[in-house]
Structures are given as structure tokens and as C-alpha cells.
Image (spheres, rainbow, N blue to C red):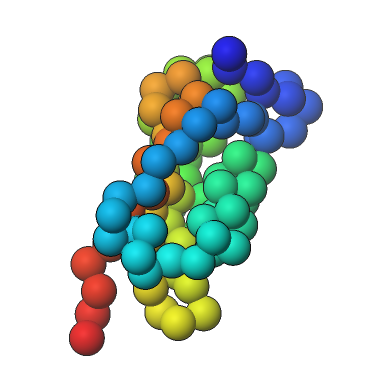
Amino acid sequence: MFRRNRKTREFRLTCFSASDAANQALTSEDIRDAILRHQRGDWGSVDRQTRRENDNALRLGDGPLLSIFETTDGIRFSVESTRFHTFAKIELLDRSS
């Protein structure tokens, strides 16, 4: 069930999954913190256009949401929730060496 607080940008995911690579590279705290930030409407380091698209999709209650975060070790990863904001997937982004 989709739940969103209309007075804020907050919503609740019902489940999420992480890729094998993300599970190996990220700590459970990294994943937990990213999910909590994503649910609060903190999109991390996405570009301005993606931020606007996310805000609009959240306001309408329809459309995918994308967040990009980086760990203290410099590992970049994304959290992307589905159209109705109930399921999210976590994946690593290309790493610069």
C-alpha cells in the first residue's frame, strides 16, 4: 500500500532489494540510511532536472524516484523506487578508480 504524508515529501516503501554488488560493497547502515533519506525526499546528489522530476512524481503520487548517495569510502550507489513508490532497488554506480 502506498503511504505518503501530504504535508511533507515523506513516503514509505513496503520493500526493497539490493544487487549482489551493492550487498557486498555497502554496509547495512549505508543501505538503511539511504532508504530513510530516500523516503524523506532527500535525493542525494542527483542533478537539478532529476530533483525536479522526483519532486513532481512525489507530489502527483506517480512516477519513479531516483536518489544517488555516496558512502564515506567514496562508493556511489543509487536508490530507485518504482512508479507508485512502494518498492526500491539499490545498485552500485560506476566507480572511478
Residue lying at 46% horizontally and 19% vertically, measured from the top left: 84
Viewer-side residue, 83 vs 52: 83
- Quarter of the rendering containing residue 38: top right
* Image height of 91 relative to 26, above or below: above
Q: Is residue 83 left or right of residue 13?
A: left
Is residue 32 placed above or below 87 in the rendered structure?
A: below
Q: Position of residue 91 (x, y in %)?
A: 32, 53
- Classify 67 as above or below 88: below
Can you give x and y, in whole percent of width and height, for residue 70 in the image? Answer: 45, 69
Q: Is residue 51 left or right of residue 6?
A: left
**44 lies left or right of 74:** right
Toward the bottom, the furthest residue is: 97
Instruction: Examine the rendering and report whether any part of residue 65 can be seen.
Output: no
The correct choice, above or below, for 86 with respect to 34 in the image is: above
Residue closest to the eye, 58 or 91: 91
Q: Quadrant of residue 64?
A: top left
Number of numbered discs overlaid on the protein picture: 0
Q: Position of residue 6 (x, y in %)?
A: 72, 22
Quadrant including the N terminus? top right
User: Extreme right residue here?
Assistant: 7
Q: Position of residue 2 (x, y in %)?
A: 58, 17
Which residue is pictured at 28% across the width and 60% down the height? 21
Left or right placement of residue 52 versus residue 33 in this view = left
- Most extreme residue toward the top, as rendered? 1
Q: Nearer the viewer, residue 21 or 10?
A: 21
Residue ID at (22%, 86%): 97
Give the residue drawn at x 30%, y 50%. 19
Question: Taking the image as drawn, is residue 43 in sight?
Answer: yes
